[in-house]
Amino acid sequence: MLYLFDDLVLDTDQRELRRDGSVIPLQPQVFDLLAYLIRHRARVVTKDDLIGAIWGGRIVSESALTTRINAARTAIGDSGEAQRLIRTLPRKGLRFIGAVREAAREVASAAAPPKVEMSSLVVGRTAPFETIDRMTRQALSGRRQMAFVTGEAGIGKTAFIAKAIERLTEQGFDVLYGRCTERFGTDEVFLPLIDALVSRYRANGPELISAVRAHAPTWILQLPGAINASERAAFQDEVFGATRERMLREFCDLLEALSAGRPWILVLEDLHWSDFATLDVVSRFARGNGKARVLALCSYRPADSAADGHPIRRLHRDLEIHGCCSELRLDRLSSSEVERYLALRFDDAELASTLSKPVFEPRWGTPCSSPRYSHTSSTRTRSSKRTADGGCLHRRHLLKTAFRTAC
């Protein structure tokens, strides 16, 4: 397991503490002490806990324990005076209070949005990415940012957002990702927000739970397995009769609190299918004026929202009038942009030139910015270039199918 905090990484598999890729030497007992404090950061750790976990319950002098604690603090850039990361609670014990992010070595984070193959080949979106770069600078300064990613079905909104997340996480942003789905029964209020919290909790529970307990207690009951039965009963008593408005306010407070430690991206896709309560959260957060290092990316299809009478378009326009959001409208790619994508995708300029026109033809659907071609389709398309007569039809059939299933 990797534990990331400040500019450090604690790797419990390799038993290394690293800063900027360089290993910080630690004695084994100091490493074990630091790892134990981080793993149990949700509570106060007593000296007896440390002695039992690190020395197996053997008799250890007070000075030996103090020496290891001081060494751990020194290694992570802390001290007994500052207690910025490891805090001493007199007559109680110790607690690690730094913001920690967990990452598994080979298991993808449950909080990550669906990956879009070939996202690095997104083309024709220079202006929207420039807008995101500008908004990112504002978000990092503490000014919350909201952007609506709009476009018709298949235009590449998911691919664009995936690429934006990739770029932002490289700058230290963490992610809350929720997606709306078309429903034919009664809507569940706040469903994409609940999904986002549940996914994030499964990836890094203790840190999120601590923030939810403190700032959004009405939401903790939405996280299965986050608290035990006795705690659940206590929280049920505390939030009994809580209104939807309270949940709305607490979620916005939670975002502000989380962003005090590091910047966050809140992604809500396909809001043309969202419940109205989720839109209330979007509206309240966008209009807030408190400090929040948060960039919210919300996508929807304007045509679908208009046809169904969904209020997302009206909310978008109202926020835009009041200067509370930006729009990142994704238009269809030009013929030259499609050709450029194909050239990058297949590393073959001649093939790209041959295929760009049939791919671009409107009757074959919207050309996406990041079509999910399979390796098999790629191979067959290459081989079809060398076939005679009917080979061209075969190639066109493959491309037609690929673009219909893209995005």
Image (cartoon, grey):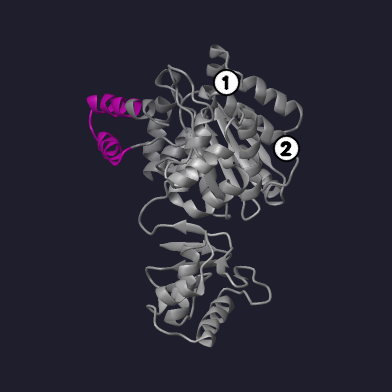
The residue segment tinted magenta is 374-400
- In front of the other: 110 or 141: 110
The answer to whether residue 389 shows anywhere in this view is no
Q: Earlier in the sequence, mark 1 or mark 2?
A: 2
User: Which residue is disc 1 drawn over?
Assistant: 302
Label 1 element class: helix
Number of marks in the rendered image: 2
Q: Is residue 227 above or below residue 25?
A: above
Nearer the viewer's eye, disc 1 or disc 2?
2
Left or right side of 389 for 305: right
- In front of the other: 86 or 390: 86
User: Which residue is disc 2 drawn over?
Assistant: 288
Residue at left 62%, top 72%?
90
Residue 279 percent across, percent down from the top left: 61, 27
Mark 1–mark 2 Cα distance, whole angstroms, equals 25 Å
- Is residue 398 magenta-colored? yes
